[in-house]
Image (cartoon, grey):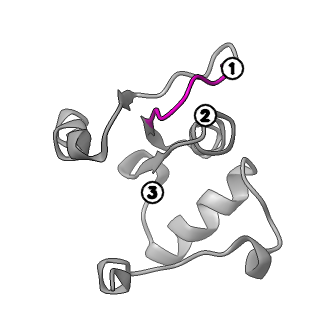
Amino acid sequence: DILHYFDVLTFSDEVKLVKPNPRLFTACLEELRVKPMNAVHVGDSYKSDVIGAIDAGMRTVLAKTREQEQKEGYVADVVIHSLLELPDALRSLE
């Protein structure tokens, strides 16, 4: 059970928004009372996670599990290839 690691859970069907809509990301941040510049979004989808989080003003970590088409102007702050790399990736953003 990993639910105890999360302070807030935001579900698309509850807020009526889907990724990459930046409002989905900011809805969660508002509930946490965290500014986007102080948050990092970790995801495995370039289109849904990286683009949406950047548009919301967040920093991003892309867990690259496959090749994905990228959109000009959107670059993940850190790219990892295994979740074992995540702690170092997050430290690099401090």
66 drawn magenta: yes
**Image coordinates for residue 9, horizontal then vertical, percent:** 52, 78
| Amino acid of disc 1 | Glu
Assess disc 2: are there few (<14), some (14-19) or many (≥20) residues with their C-alpha within 10 Å of its C-alpha.
many
Given contact means CB atoms under 8 Å apart, are the residues at marks 2 and 1 in contact?
yes
Q: Residue at x 68, y 61 (%)?
A: 24
Image height of 28 relative to 60, above or below: below
Magenta stretch secondary structure, dominant? loop
Camera-side residue of 48 and 77: 48
> Residue beneath label 2, please?
46
Label 3 secondary element: loop
Residue at x 38% of width, y 84% of height: 3
x, y percentage for residue 48? 67, 44
Displayed quadrant of residue 1: bottom left
Viewer-nearest residue: 58 or 65 = 65
Name the one closer to the observer, 16 or 23: 16
Q: Residues within 10 Å of mark 3 (few under 14, many from 20)?
A: few
Please state which of the two labelled residues, at mark 3 or mark 2, is closer to the viewer: 2
Calculate the distance from the C-alpha at mark 3 to the C-alpha at mark 2. Answer: 22 Å
Q: Quadrant of the C terminus?
A: top left
Instruction: Quickly name the residue at label 1.
Output: 69
Q: Say few, some or many: other residues with alpha carbon within 10 Å of mark 1 (under 14 / 14 to 19 / 20 or more).
A: few
Q: Position of residue 16 (x, y in %)?
A: 83, 72
Mark 3, residue position: 35
Of marks 2 and 1, which one's residue comes earlier in the chain?
2
Q: CA distance from mark 2 to mark 1?
A: 8 Å
- Whether residue 30 sits left or right of residue 51 in the image: it is left
